[in-house]
Image (tube, helix red, strand yellow):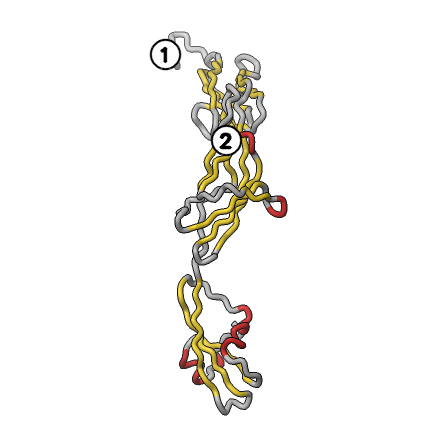
Amino acid sequence: LSLLNPSIYANDGLQFSYFRTREAAANNEESQKIKTPKTYTVSEVGKSTVFVRVATYNELCFQIVPVNLLVEEAPVSKLNDVYVICADTNNSENSIEVHTGLDANAFSFIWYRGKGDQKQQLVAQQNASLLIEEANLGWYTVHMQNANSCGIWKAFEVKRSVPPTSFMAQLVSKPYEANQTIEAKVVGDGNYKFQINGGTWQDSPRFTRLPYGVHTITVKDSFGCYSKSVEVKIIDYPRFFSPNGDGI
């Protein structure tokens, strides 16, 4: 606020005090004075007014000057931090459209390859969205600005998820052991999670303390592009003998 002083009065020999209300400025109320005008913060979007008490140093004369402040709302985009292109098993090129979620008629956009000091402007891209081919993975940055020159920057990364080349699951414990264990094996360039019988996903491919019967083991990549299931059967025998077959 103190930067406004020369535009209010250019004469030297004056002191400037800032207040939130006209009455407080007129009465020079210390409790209502804005103590740090250089770092005064307005948190609410829209118009607000502060009142400047301009006085001689002996306070014999003063004048109240209203100063209107306008806070414009910055753009709020719907961009994620990471986007994933799901690669096909037939090696065809895929793409993904990244959209800011903003109106192209109300905002301007400049897209860049890279981030930080390493970004390079894509001059031809002035739209609210950007189509990114699988061959152009990596970091991107976009600057979004409204008609009042309020703008924000957003960097995001585009990755690719490749399906596993093979997946299997097998019983790794000895037959008829009390602690039956199934372990999944997956080959591929990706991060994978594992599940048994529709349960909770886990990072470990190993499942222990399993009852006999048929179990469904499922693998998926961490981005949700691919999943595949196999069945493993565990054969066991009852831990008791019932001569007449009634289970007692």
Q: Say which quadrant the C terminus sits in.
A: top left
The residue where tag 1 is placed is 246
Measured along the vertical axis of the image, is residue 101 above or below residue 96? Answer: below
Q: Residue 133 versus residue 19: which sits nearer the camera?
A: 133
Q: Which amino acid lies under the numbered mark 2 shown in the image of this protein?
A: Ile
Determine if residue 100 is in view: yes
Distance of mark 2 from mark 1, alpha carbons? 58 Å
Disc 2 crowd rating (10 Å Cα; few below 14, some 14-19, many 20+) is: many
Disc 1, SS: loop
Question: Are dots 2 and 1 in contact, CB under 8 Å?
Answer: no
Q: Residue furthest top?
A: 243
| Of callouts 2 and 1, the N-terminal one | 2
Residue 13's tag is none
Label 2, secondary structure: give it. Answer: strand
* Residue topped by disc 2: 85
Where is residue 104? Give x, y as percent.
Answer: 41, 46
